[in-house]
Amino acid sequence: QVQLVESGGGLVQAGGSLRLSCAASERSLSSYVMGWFRQAPGKEREFVAAARWRDGSTKYADSVEDRFTISRDNAKNTLYLQMNSLKPEDTAVYYCGAARSFVLGVRPTEYDYWGQGTQVTVSS
């Protein structure tokens, strides 16, 4: 059982930046893909970005490409999401997920474990 704890959400003005963190309880994440998803009120959970822990390969949703950066810290077992040039439409609860897989999945059903989520609100 992998436990994930997100942090770093908050309220920011449009054009601003935030960095989300996801701390994982698992000692070795080399067999995992980690991902960020978000869910706005009344909408389905959608893919944001994913990273393969073993080699650092990444994938992004088109809507965040060139604005968001996913990264990992092996020593801290922590996943990050650096979010720049934030827009009001980025407002959502952001979730960290872990998949025991080597595939950079974009569907929530491909992930086995989830954190509790952290709220990001971007004001216009």
Image: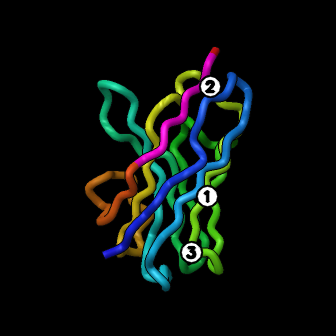
Residue identifier under label 1: 80
Q: From the top left corner, tell me how far across and down residue 115 is, in percent.
A: 39, 56
Magenta span contains residue 74: no
Q: Residue at x 60, y 25 (%)?
A: 122
> Of marks 2 and 1, which one's residue comes earlier in the chain?
1
Magenta span contains residue 121: yes
Residue identifier under label 3: 77
Q: Residue at x 30, y 25 (%)?
A: 42
Left or right, 119 with respect to 76, comes to left
> Of marks 2 and 3, which one's residue comes earlier in the chain?
3
Q: Residue at x 71, y 32 (%)?
A: 85
Quadrant housing the N terminus: bottom left
**Do tag 2 and tag 3 residues touch (Cβ < 8 Å)?**
no
Q: Disc 1 on helix, strand or loop?
A: strand
For the residue marked with disc 3, what is the amino acid? Asn
Q: From the top left corner, tell me how far across and down residue 4 is, in percent.
A: 43, 63
Please name which of the two marks, 2 or 3, marks the residue nearer to the observer: 3
Q: CA distance from mark 3 to mark 1?
A: 10 Å
Left or right, 106 with respect to 77, comes to left
Q: Disc 3 on helix, strand or loop?
A: loop
Q: CA distance from mark 2 to mark 3?
A: 29 Å
SS majority, magenta: strand
**Which labelled disc corresponds to residue 87?**
2
**Which labelled disc corresponds to residue 9?**
none
For the residue marked with disc 2, what is the amino acid? Lys
Q: Give the residues drawn in magenta, as a range.
A: 117-123
Q: Residues within 10 Å of mark 2 (few under 14, many from 20)?
A: some
The number of numbered badges drawn on the structure is 3
